Image: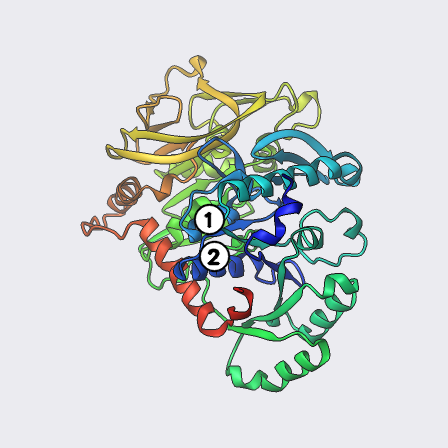
């Protein structure tokens, strides 16, 4: 039986829409998911379509947005690509990779997306919804919208806002960010642009990121409710930025908030950076200060350098060369610096990058085979198909420990036999997951395909201790708090803060 015929049987979904991008939809959904879990409900997150290069791989090897994975974790369930059936991964120049139910199925230009992908996109969204309800008949979907639901030039191709709200007859919450200013105009303008049947779905308004005394907004709350006839169900205070990241590159502008750190880390801010959530475990280390590097500079101030993942490795390697950063990274290595590359960062640390199918950002034949930074004797060839899988392995360096993470990458990396003078060793028992070498001066160059490597507590602690030793700092002998425990605490604190200021009673009927 089609889902439409069963809508009267399911628990009323809650949908979080925003007056703009960055209004706080992702965090609001995360908080509501954990609040409902704590109430004994069975919440499941859902976002029909997300555009992001910050991805996660589920247990079946399906790609999904990282934000929906965190929301699933807040629900206490395993992330699944069904929770984010359409993922668009930008490649620059208004081109995106199209992923349906975790699998890459094509490339689209923004101007052709509606014509080429709208019908199949809506079908895959409905298929996912039906599958979720079939597997979890007692669940309550907590749905996240995208951007603004009333972008009038795009509303005819809406797949993930009001179309889903109307399809499921969801109870909708409109979130607005008062920190941006113009909160009254944002709310009124958004509601005025909705059709009457759409406006009826808005059952509550949340004022997000309010600074100062909440009582000072009493008159504003009353004005909004009188003008819109929609209750303001929550005024959420400004929360510190240790909470889970929004699915936004705004995270790249945040710096570590701990005082007196022992270690300074520089992360190269690639134009096509992907999976920046890999570094969230480092942001939660009190001894570490993180800065993002986007231009050539002397890197000596940093205790180690990270080259992150890339959606367009050839393009980003060309950026490193043209900007002078490749030269600075090589100089840093020669001065006993420690460097680690993850996924695309690993590939760029090698000697050659070859892109015969134009999959990784090469624009012409002269860019199909280029030189890497040349610090590891590795060559990478990019093929047509992508590898996505969960990883369970064991590390050999800098310690022996169990390792979990996931792979998302095009390309196969092998030892470059033309560079036999290099001494290089595997990092893991699975020999193709990463390599390292020690410089004569004592610095290390390492690269791995494993996303989430820093979430492995023993491995992270030992790598940090390796850096500390090179600085003549005492090793941290105390057992650190496991990152996943920290993440749980962060999500629980987030939910508690929302719960203090949010009235969800009318949404749970």
The answer to whether 398 appears left or right of 164 in the picture is left
Compared to residue 60, the image places residue 217 above or below, namely below
Compared to residue 172, the image places residue 472 above or below, namely above
Q: 24 or 75: nearer the eye?
A: 75
The answer to whether 377 appears left or right of 64 in the picture is left
Residue holding disc 2: 33
Which quadrant of the structure image shows residue 197? bottom right
Compared to residue 238, the image places residue 90 above or below, namely above
Which quadrant of the structure image shows residue 421? top left
Query: Which quarter shows the N terminus?
Result: top right
Q: 164 or 271: nearer the eye?
A: 164
Q: Residues within 10 Å of mark 2 (few under 14, many from 20)?
A: many
Q: Which mark is residue 331?
A: none
**Which coloring applies here?**
rainbow
Q: Position of residue 143 (x, y in %)?
A: 58, 53
Q: Is residue 65 at least partly visible in the picture? A: yes
Residue at x-position 69% and y-position 31% = 107
Residue holding disc 1: 72
Q: 292 or 137: nearer the eye?
A: 137
């Amino acid at each position: 039986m089609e889902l439409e015929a069963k809508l009267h049987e399911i628990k009323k979904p809650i949908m979080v829409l925003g007056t703009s991008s960055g209004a706080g939809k992702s965090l609001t959904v995360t908080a509501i998911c954990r609040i409902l879990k704590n109430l004994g409900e069975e919440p499941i997150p859902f976002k029909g379509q997300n555009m992001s290069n910050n991805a996660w791989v589920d247990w079946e090897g399906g790609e999904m947005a990282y934000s929906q994975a965190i929301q699933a974790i807040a629900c206490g369930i395993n992330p699944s690509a069904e929770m984010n059936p359409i993922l668009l991964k930008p490649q620059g120049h208004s081109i995106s990779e199209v992923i349906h139910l975790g699998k890459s199925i094509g490339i689209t230009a923004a101007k052709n997306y509606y014509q080429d992908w709208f019908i199949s996109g809506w079908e895959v969204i409905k298929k996912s919804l039906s599958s979720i309800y079939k597997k979890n008949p007692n669940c309550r979907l907590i749905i996240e919208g995208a951007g603004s639901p009333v972008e009038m030039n795009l509303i005819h191709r809406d797949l993930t806002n009001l179309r889903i709200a109307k399809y499921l007859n969801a109870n909708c919450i409109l979130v607005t960010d008062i920190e941006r200013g113009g909160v009254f105009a944002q709310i009124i303008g958004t509601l005025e642009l909705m059709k009457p049947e759409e406006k009826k779905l808005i059952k509550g308004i949340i004022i997000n990121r309010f600074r100062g005394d909440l009582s000072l907004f009493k008159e504003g709350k009353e004005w909004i409710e009188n003008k819109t006839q929609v209750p303001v169900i929550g005024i959420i205070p400004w929360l510190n930025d240790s909470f889970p990241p929004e699915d936004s590159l705004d995270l790249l502008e945040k710096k570590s908030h701990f005082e007196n750190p022992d270690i300074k880390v520089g992360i190269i801010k690639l134009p096509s950076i992907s999976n920046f959530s890999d570094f969230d475990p480092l942001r939660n280390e009190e001894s570490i200060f993180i800065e993002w590097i986007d231009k050539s500079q002397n890197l000596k101030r940093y205790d180690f350098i990270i080259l992150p993942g890339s959606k367009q490795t050839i393009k980003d390697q060309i950026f490193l060369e043209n900007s002078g950063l490749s030269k600075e990274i090589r100089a840093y290595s020669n001065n006993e610096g420690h460097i680690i590359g993850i996924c695309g960062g690993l590939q760029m640390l090698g000697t050659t990058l070859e892109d015969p199918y134009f999959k990784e950002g090469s624009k012409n034949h002269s860019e199909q085979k280029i030189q890497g930074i040349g610090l590891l004797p590795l060559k990478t060839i990019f093929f047509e198909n992508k590898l996505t899988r969960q990883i369970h392995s064991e590390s050999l360096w800098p310690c022996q420990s169990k390792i979990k993470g996931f792979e998302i990458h095009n390309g196969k990396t092998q030892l470059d036999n033309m560079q036999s003078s290099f001494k290089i060793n595997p990092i893991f028992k699975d020999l193709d997951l990463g390599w390292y070498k020690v410089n004569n001066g004592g610095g290390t160059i390492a690269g791995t395909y494993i996303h989430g490597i820093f979430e492995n507590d023993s491995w992270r602690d030992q790598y940090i201790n390796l850096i500390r030793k090179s600085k003549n700092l005492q090793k941290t002998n105390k057992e650190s708090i496991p990152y996943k425990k920290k993440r749980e605490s962060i999500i629980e604190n987030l939910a508690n803060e929302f719960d203090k200021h949010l009235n969800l009673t009318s949404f749970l009927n």
